[in-house]
Image (cartoon, rainbow, N blue to C red):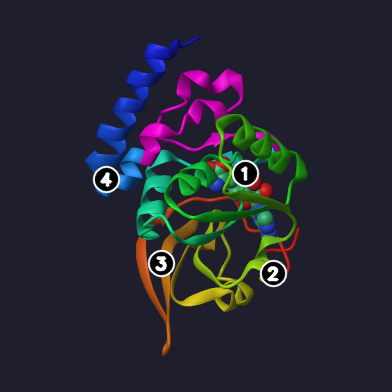
Amino acid sequence: MPDKADLESAKRRMLDRHLSGRGIRSPSVLAAMAKVPRQRFLPEALLDEAYADRALPIECEQTISQPYIVGLMTQALKLTGEESVLEIGTGSGYQTAVLAELAGQVVTIERHAPLSAGAGQLFAELGYENVTLIVGDGTLGHADRAPYDRIIVTATAERYPAALYEQLRTGGILVMPIGRQDKQVLQTVRKTSSGPTTTNLSGCRFVPLIGEQGWPE
Ligand code: SAH
């Protein structure tokens, strides 16, 4: 079982090698990822791998995203501390915590109630008070709190859900993996007054986005 010092040095390695070393340059993103204890978001049996640069299994047959991908997606959101962010796919809550460090308010939607409950418990323990947890189908977004300055989806669909684009403020940014099971690309979509502008960031591999505007169950 790794002790506190082991975890701190593993975290340092993650920051230097897998984040800074691979192009995550935003000082605020690196500082947020230095602060959030990833080990708290994992099953205890995986503590040894808390800062390895790979996705790991969590409850309900889902995964906690790879640190590099969390860094890349968060950096692409260009957060300055004030934004209202909608996240689809709470999962372990790790990505949510990184967002909570960098944004004003975070609304996060998860379809599996036990995952949402587990993440909520951790946010209370770690003192994140700017997060609202919702259980439901995130492909429909959450119109009550729209428009959002930023939207992040941590599960894959063949196209971004129309409801999410609608709930994005003009000038806002949506980041999401697009594709099929074995061929996915991380995309940034900026909403402009003349329509969406799309940029490809990197190949990736996420679990499917399941819902009305995603894949069938
Ligand atoms: N950001 C998370 C990644 C979790 S994996 C983390 O780092 O831990 C993606 C999550 O999206 C899974 O928990 C899955 O249950 C959830 N998901 C899939 N389709 C969804 C939908 N339509 N609405 C909400 N959550 C969804």
Instruction: Kindly tell me whether mark 3's CB lies below 8 Å from ligand 1.
Output: no
| Residue appearing at x 51%, y 42% in the figure | 97
User: Where does the magenta region start and end?
Assistant: 32-60
Q: For the residue labelled by badge 4, is the local secondary structure a helix, a strand or a loop?
A: helix
Q: Which numbered marker is on residue 27?
A: 4
Q: Position of residue 165 (x, y in %)?
A: 55, 75
Give the SS element for disc 1.
loop
The x, y position of residue 193, in whole percent, is: 43, 88
Question: Of label 4 and label 3, which has the lower sequence position?
Answer: 4
Residue 185 left/right relative to 166: left
Q: CA distance from mark 1 to mark 4?
A: 25 Å
Residue 81 placement: quadrant: bottom left
Mark 2 and mark 4: span between their CA atoms? 33 Å
- Which residue lies under the disc numbered 3? 188
The kind of residue tagged 3 is Thr
Find out whether residue 179 is within the magenta segment: no
User: Magenta stretch containing residue 40, yes or no?
Assistant: yes
Mark 1 or mark 4: whose residue is earlier in sequence: 4
Question: Helix, strand, or loop for circle 3?
Answer: strand
Cα separation, mark 3 vs mark 2, equals 24 Å
Q: Camera-side residue: 169 or 205?
A: 169
| Residue of label 2 | 144
Residue type marked 4:
Pro
Q: Eyeballing the image, is 7 above or below 122?
A: above
The percent position of residue 104, horizontal first and vertical second, equals: 49, 55
Residue linked to disc 1: 91
Q: Is mark 1 within 8 Å of ligand 1?
A: yes
